[in-house]
Image (spheres, rainbow, N blue to C red):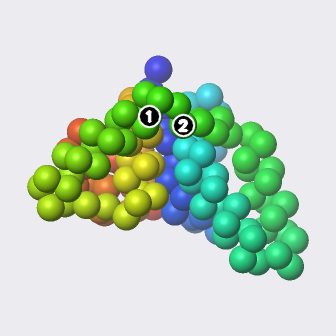
Amino acid sequence: MMRYMLDTNTVSSFIKENIAVSKRITSLPMDKLCLSVISEAELLYGLAKKPHSKNLHKVVQEFLKRIDVLTWDSAVAEQYGNLRAELEAKGNVLGELDMQIAAHASQVGAVLVTNDQAFKRVQKLKVEDWTQ
């Protein structure tokens, strides 16, 4: 079963009601969508920076209740180690959290949905941009 792992920026676009992203997300069954626990952490960090944005907190918490948040395990950790070593050897590194998300999507065989072009440098990673 093909799954789509939503990157943090895609979730943000959805919450901001980007029409293209909203259409795509709502057209799929929820079991086709997932989120890395790393993206969950990034979303929760964003909420922590905006403690008085009650509506934003409600929207993000409701979204997190409905999507499958995948946890890290030893297989993902191994994929991360291999991916990081491979990218560093090529002088082609990503930000730390992006590298973790890329490894997670790669290990579970998900398409990473993001508008961050840096992910396209990861050759074995399937990437789609739903903002266009």
* Residue 97 visible from this viewpoint: yes
Mark 1 is on which residue type?
Answer: Val
- The residue lying at 33 percent from left, 42 percent from top is 81
**x%, y% of residue 21?**
54, 56
Residue 132 seen from this side: no
The x, y position of residue 37, in whole percent, is 60, 45
* Mark 2 to mark 1 CA distance (whole Å): 6 Å
Frontmost residue, 97 versus 2: 97
Specify the farthest residue to the left: 90
Furthest-top residue in this view: 1
Location of residue 82 by image quarter: top left
Give the residue at mark 2: 72
Amino acid, disc 2: Trp
Q: Is residue 115 above or below residue 111?
A: below
Q: Where does residue 22 sit, x and y in percent of width and height? A: 60, 54
Q: Which residue is mark 1?
A: 76
Would residue 18 be found to the left or right of residue 95 on screen? right
Is 124 located above or below residue 61 in the figure? above
Q: On the image, which quarter does residue 11 sit in? A: bottom right
Q: Which residue is drawn at the image coordinates 36% and 42% (left, top)?
A: 80
Name the residue: 73% across, 47% down. Answer: 64
> Residue 128 or 70: which is nearer the viewer?
70
SS of the residue at dot 1?
Answer: helix
Q: Which mark is residue 63?
A: none
Q: Secondary structure at mark 2?
A: loop
**Mark 2 vs 1: CB contact within 8 A:** yes
Percent coordinates x, y for residue 116 in the rendering: 37, 63
